[in-house]
Each structure stands twice: as structure tokens, then as C-alpha cells.
């Protein structure tokens, strides 16, 4: 990869990768069939990376992969099923990828569920925590062999800004206002 990529809150993903050559690199983006994940996958593919979007909805994922391949004009985009709410799915995906012997140069942990109705993962964890945190933790750690093969891999973990809507708790952090 060429030098550090710097962005800014007003730059698009395509602007951030402008002039960056990711040919010969493999990138995995969870939740790449929509939203930020879709735009991230589009930018990585436009820069020449082979992009794998990993998600639970096969129909949306395959359609997004076809659209992204056409839009990007760079590297190919493929879909591979991954259910972050299932540790068996996560382990299986990572094991299959590691078995290929291919490096994973860029891993973007983007997929998430937000404020779902009360539910549990197949492993018994609360759905939002199990998917967003435990699923991604198991996915990233499961891909360590492929990440190490990349000799300088990048792992990007996205988060929401939902914490900004929380009220302060004076007994824990003192009498401060939310902007302090």
C-alpha cells in the first residue's frame, strides 16, 4: 500500500483512496451489502483490491457484489455468507479462508445490529452484544493466520456514535455536562 491514507469527516471513501493502488490485495468487509460497508467495499474495489463482502443475507449480498463489481471498475467483489450471531458460522468462515492460504490484507469489521427486539444469538448471548462485539472479536481473531500472512495487514473496527445520546451518571463520572 502507498503511504498512510488520511481522511477527514468531509471526504468520501472514494476520495480517501484516490491514488492508492490496492492491486493484489484482499479486503474483507462485514456488512458490505449496504450503508457504510457498501461504500467501503466500493472504494476498496475501485482502488484495485479483491473485495469479499461477508454478511448473513445471501440475496442482498450477492446483488451488492454484482453491483459493486460493475460500479468499481477495479477489483472484483464477491459475497460469502457469514452470520456474526453464530460462532459456528464465524469459525467456519475463518477456517475456510485460512485454509486457502491467501492473506487478508484489510479487514473491515462493519456489520452490526442496532436496538433489535429482545433476542439471543444461537450461542445464547444477547443479540446486539453477541453480534456486534463477540461475533466480530471471534471473526478477527479467527482470521489471525490470514492477517499475519499479509505482513502488515490492517484491521478497521467501526462503531456507532450512539454513546453520545447517553446521559451522564454523576455517581460514576462526577457532575459534568455531556460536552466536557
Image: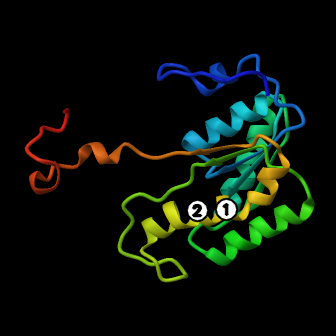
**Secondary structure at numbered mark 1:** helix
Q: Which residue is mark 2?
A: 137
Q: Residue furthest top?
A: 19
Using the numbered discs, state the Cα–Cα distance from disc 2 to disc 1 in whole angstroms. Answer: 6 Å
Expressed as whole percent of the image width and height from the top left, the position of residue 165 reads 24, 45
- For the N terminus, the image quarter is top right
Image quadrant occupied by the C terminus:
top left
- Residue 50 falls in which quadrant of the image? top right
Q: Crowding near pointer 1: few (<14 within 10 Å), some, many (20+)?
A: few
Looking at the picture, does residue 139 appear above or below residue 176?
below
30 lies left or right of 105: left
In the rendered image, which residue does mark 1 sit on? 141
Q: Position of residue 112 (x, y in %)?
A: 51, 56
Taking the image as shown, residue 171 lies to the left or right of residue 157, namely left
Q: Is there CB contact under 8 Å for labels 2 and 1?
A: yes
Residue 101 spot, x, y in % from top left: 92, 58
Callout 2 secondary element: helix
Tell me the residue at 66%/55% (across/down): 60
Residue found at x 82% / y 24%: 21
At label 2, counting other C-alpha atoms closer than 10 Å, the crowd grade (few under 14, some 14-19, many 20 or more) is some
Labels in figure, total: 2
Q: Which residue corresponds to the image point at 74% horizontal and 60% vertical from the top-left?
A: 143
Colouring scheme, one of rainbow, by chain, secondary structure, one colour: rainbow
169 sits left or right of 59 in the view = left
Question: 160 or 75: nearer the eye?
Answer: 160
Residue 73 at x, y percent in the picture: 83, 28
Q: Which mark is residue 49?
A: none
Q: Nearer the viewer, residue 59 or 93?
A: 93
Residue 15 placement: quadrant: top right
Amino acid at each position: 500500500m502507498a503511504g498512510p491514507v488520511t481522511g477527514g469527516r468531509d471526504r468520501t471513501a472514494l476520495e480517501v483512496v484516490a491514488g492508492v493502488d490496492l492491486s493484489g490485495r484482499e479486503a474483507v468487509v462485514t456488512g458490505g451489502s449496504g450503508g457504510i460497508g457498501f461504500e467501503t467495499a466500493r472504494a476498496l474495489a475501485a482502488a484495485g483490491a479483491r473485495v469479499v463482502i461477508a454478511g448473513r443475507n445471501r440475496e442482498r449480498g450477492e446483488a451488492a457484489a454484482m453491483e459493486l463489481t460493475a460500479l468499481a471498475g477495479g477489483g472484483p467483489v464477491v459475497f460469502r455468507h457469514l452470520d456474526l450471531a453464530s460462532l459456528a458460522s464465524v469459525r467456519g468462515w475463518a477456517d475456510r479462508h485460512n485454509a486457502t492460504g491467501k492473506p487478508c490484507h484489510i479487514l473491515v469489521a462493519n456489520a452490526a445490529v442496532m436496538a433489535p427486539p429482545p433476542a439471543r444469538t444461537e450461542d445464547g448471548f444477547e443479540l446486539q452484544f453477541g453480534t456486534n462485539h463477540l461475533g466480530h472479536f471471534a471473526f478477527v481473531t479467527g482470521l489471525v493466520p490470514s492477517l499475519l500472512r499479509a505482513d502488515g495487514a490492517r484491521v478497521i473496527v467501526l462503531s456507532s456514535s450512539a454513546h453520545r445520546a447517553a446521559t451522564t451518571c454523576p455517581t460514576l463520572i462526577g457532575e459534568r455536562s455531556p460536552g466536557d
